[in-house]
Image (spheres, rainbow, N blue to C red):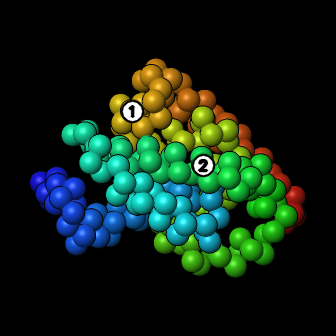
Amino acid sequence: MEEDRLIEEARQGNVTAYGELIKIYSPIVERFAFQMGHRYQDIPDISQEVFIRVYRFLDQFSRAKFTTWLYKITLNVSRDYFRKEGQHHRRVELMKNEPNELQHSVDAEGSLLREEEDQQLHQCIQTLDEKYRLPIILFYFHEKKYEEISDILNITLSTVKTRILRGKSQLKKALEEAEKKEGKQNG
């Protein structure tokens, strides 16, 4: 498989192979980071940190699925970034208080939101607690199976199922509330 060859060559110091891994997987990393709630302008920094960690720890990568390992690294880098920058609590407020910034960057973010064309859906997903948001994102937008989500998030299979079910319910309520709010503004 091409992925295995590139990983092995990158482990042996082949910079071209490592560059190919970045080229192949950076859209996934960027999209996942954005869906986790990072601002568009922060995505390159997060992606860069993810691939620095991949490079540093590539020799420790076991024969597990590479994308699962990559999602775990992206998740850890994202959490570190939120803590470091103190944005975890401000990101929802940013969306509420600075709609012009969001509207201004919608075109640039369009490539990250290929399947999420509805900005309202994205905003509602961001209001979910992380324990529900991450399984929803991984299952519906990254097409990960329950088993992969369990491995990425380091939770049991039954917990994945429960969180997806509860997350869907909360997301449905958030979307209904957003539609009501929009209806009042337009009415």
Secondary element under disc 2, as helix, strand or loop, is helix
Asked which quadrant contains residue 165, the reply is: top right
Q: CA distance from mark 2 to mark 1?
A: 19 Å
| Quadrant holding the N terminus | bottom left
Mark 2 near mark 1, Cβ–Cβ under 8 Å?
no
Q: Position of residue 36 (x, y in %)?
A: 58, 52
From what the image shows, is residue 142 above or below residue 31? Answer: above
- Return the residue at label 1: 151
Q: Position of residue 187 (x, y in %)?
A: 87, 64
Binning the other alpha carbons within 10 Å of mark 1 as few (below 14), some (14 to 19) or many (20 upward) gives some
- Return the residue at label 2: 80
In the image, what residue occupies the spot 29% across and 70% down?
A: 19
Amino acid, disc 1: Asp
Nearer the observer, 50 or 150: 50
Q: Position of residue 182 (x, y in %)?
A: 80, 59
In the image, what residue occupies the spot 35% across and 49% down?
A: 57
Amino acid, disc 2: Asp
Give the number of the disc on residue 99.
Answer: none
> Left or right of 162: which side holds 103?
right
Asked which quadrant contains residue 139, the reply is: top left
Nearer the observer, 86 or 56: 56
Nearer the viewer's eye, disc 2 or disc 1? 2
Q: Can you see residue 116?
A: no
Nearer the observer, 89 or 119: 89
Numbered label tally: 2
In the image, what residue occupies the spot 71% across and 74% down?
A: 103
Q: Which mark sits nearer the N-terminus, 2 or 1?
A: 2
Q: Can you see residue 111?
A: yes
In the image, what residue occupies the spot 44% across and 48% down?
A: 73
From what the image shows, is residue 186 above or below residue 134? Answer: below
